[in-house]
């Protein structure tokens, strides 16, 4: 009888713990990523400057480099720099901009990449995607999945609260993304990958249901796991589909129209809340309405904005964002495309969504 299986490109090792940066050499040696510690270590110019001593102690033979990450130009320059010497791997340490820059450069060089997160602002830690600025616009590039993902919870706890809240918004928005994927399957026949769906959904549920406070280490560990699972779900699916639905259409539209209103993750959380409400309203499904209330309660518990006013927008302004949102992802089918509400109907739904929020 033939054995049917598939090969998944996932990180070789994942470690989420306090003080993880101090154990970098041990972790990389144990997993045979590098024996002698001959790696390039790339740090950002912010908090990265504080880590030189700790990194040098953990990886005494590492070649430390500092970059201003986040742009395609910086990633291309780093790729050129990595060609000047032979390394076992390249280790990126920092937030999303640094890690995305290093992922792209490592892919261009054909090198294993280790992602070491000091903040949890989005689900790019383990994803096969780098978001880099080119010509003033954020562009997503396909890259290799990191060979290892390490999260230092001590560093994450020190990061600005808004970054953690952004990560929460990105993680819990997968309740919307997965529902949109299933809707598209039913309405258009778009294939759904059950494993990718389960990974994205289970991480989001863990964050929504976790009773801990925002900076508790056990909650931060749950958040890190959720963001990593979201990234791996995209690698499994071969697209961003399990982690990007109406919620992310709304967030991208918000960035384009009102770029200073909210971070991507905050926008995704707000978008997920609205999309879940109109999904519940259109189907009269009590289970979906319970999901709406659970989302709203989790967002309130962690201090995320739940209304347009909390990000400085009027109902009409937020309605214009939602009306434009489908244009940010042409060809993607979500609850927004399914209902196809006009501006007036969207404004009514936004007001109703606000009124229905759990107090």
Image: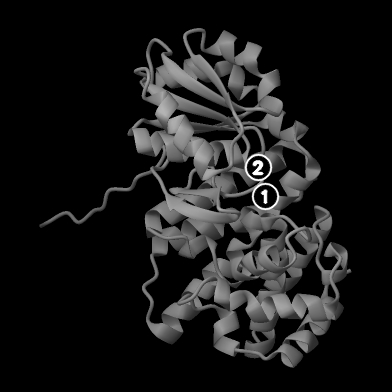
Front residue of this view, candidates 347 and 194: 347
Label 1 residue SS: helix
Residue in the picture at 69% in, 40% down: 220
Residue in the picture at 70% in, 27% down: 47
Res. 151 mark: none
Q: Mark 1 or mark 2: name the one nearer the start of the chain.
A: 2
Residue in the picture at 54% in, 42% down: 125
The image quarter containing residue 268 is bottom right
The image quarter containing residue 82 is top left
Q: How dense is the environment of label 2, judged by Cα within 10 Å: few (below 14), some, or many (20 and up)?
A: many
Taking the view exactly as shown, the residue that stands out farthest to the front is: 135
Q: How dense is the environment of label 1, judged by Cα within 10 Å: few (below 14), some, or many (20 and up)?
A: many
Would residue 126 be seen by someone viewing this image from the given angle? yes
Image spot of residue 39 (x, y percent):
43, 18
**Residue highlighted by disc 2:** 120
- CB atoms at circles 1 and 2 under 8 Å apart? yes
Q: Is residue 252 above or below residue 132?
A: below
Image spot of residue 90 (x, y percent):
44, 26
Q: Quick one: quadrant of the N terminus? A: bottom left
**Residue highlighted by disc 1:** 167
Residue in the picture at 89% in, 69% down: 359
| Left or right position of 152 against 215 | left
Q: Is residue 233 above or below residue 164?
A: below
Front residue of this view, candidates 53 and 79: 79
Image spot of residue 34 (x, y percent):
38, 18
Taking the view exactly as shown, the residue that stands out farthest to the left is: 1
């Amino acid at each position: 009888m033939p054995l049917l299986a598939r090969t998944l490109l996932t990180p070789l090792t994942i470690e989420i713990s306090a003080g993880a940066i101090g154990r970098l050499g041990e972790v990389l040696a144990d997993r045979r990523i590098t024996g002698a510690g001959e790696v390039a270590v790339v740090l950002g110019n912010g908090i990265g400057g504080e880590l030189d001593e700790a990194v040098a102690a953990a990886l005494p033979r590492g070649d430390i480099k500092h970059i201003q990450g986040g742009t395609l130009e910086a990633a291309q320059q780093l790729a050129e720099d990595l060609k000047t010497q032979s390394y076992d791997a390249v280790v990126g340490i920092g937030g999303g901009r640094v890690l995305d820059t290093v992922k792209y450069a490592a892919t261009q060089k054909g090198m294993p990449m280790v992602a070491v997160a000091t903040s949890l602002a989005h689900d790019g830690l383990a994803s096969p995607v780098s978001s880099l600025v080119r010509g003033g616009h954020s562009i997503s590039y396909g890259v290799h999945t990191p060979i290892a993902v390490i999260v230092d919870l001590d560093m994450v706890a020190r990061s600005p609260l808004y970054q953690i809240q952004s990560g929460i918004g990105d993680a819990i928005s997968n309740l919307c993304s997965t529902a949109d994927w299933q809707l598209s399957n039913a309405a258009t026949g778009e294939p759904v990958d059950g494993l990718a769906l389960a990974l994205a959904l289970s991480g989001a549920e863990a964050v929504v249901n976790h009773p801990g406070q925002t900076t508790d280490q056990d909650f931060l560990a749950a958040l890190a796991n959720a963001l990593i699972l979201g990234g791996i779900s995209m690698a499994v699916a071969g697209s961003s589909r399990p982690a990007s639905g109406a919620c992310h259409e709304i967030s991208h539209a918000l960035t384009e129209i009102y770029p200073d209103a909210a971070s991507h993750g905050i926008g995704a959380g707000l978008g997920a809340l609205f999309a879940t409400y109109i999904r519940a309203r259109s189907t009269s499904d009590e289970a979906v309405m319970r999901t709406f209330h659970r989302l709203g309660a989790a967002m309130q518990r962690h201090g995320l904005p739940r209304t347009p006013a909390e990000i400085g927008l009027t109902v009409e302004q937020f309605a214009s964002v939602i009306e434009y949102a489908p244009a940010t992802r042409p060809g993607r089918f979500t609850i927004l495309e399914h209902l196809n509400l006009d501006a007036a109907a969207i404004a009514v739904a936004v007001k109703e969504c606000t009124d229905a929020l759990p107090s």
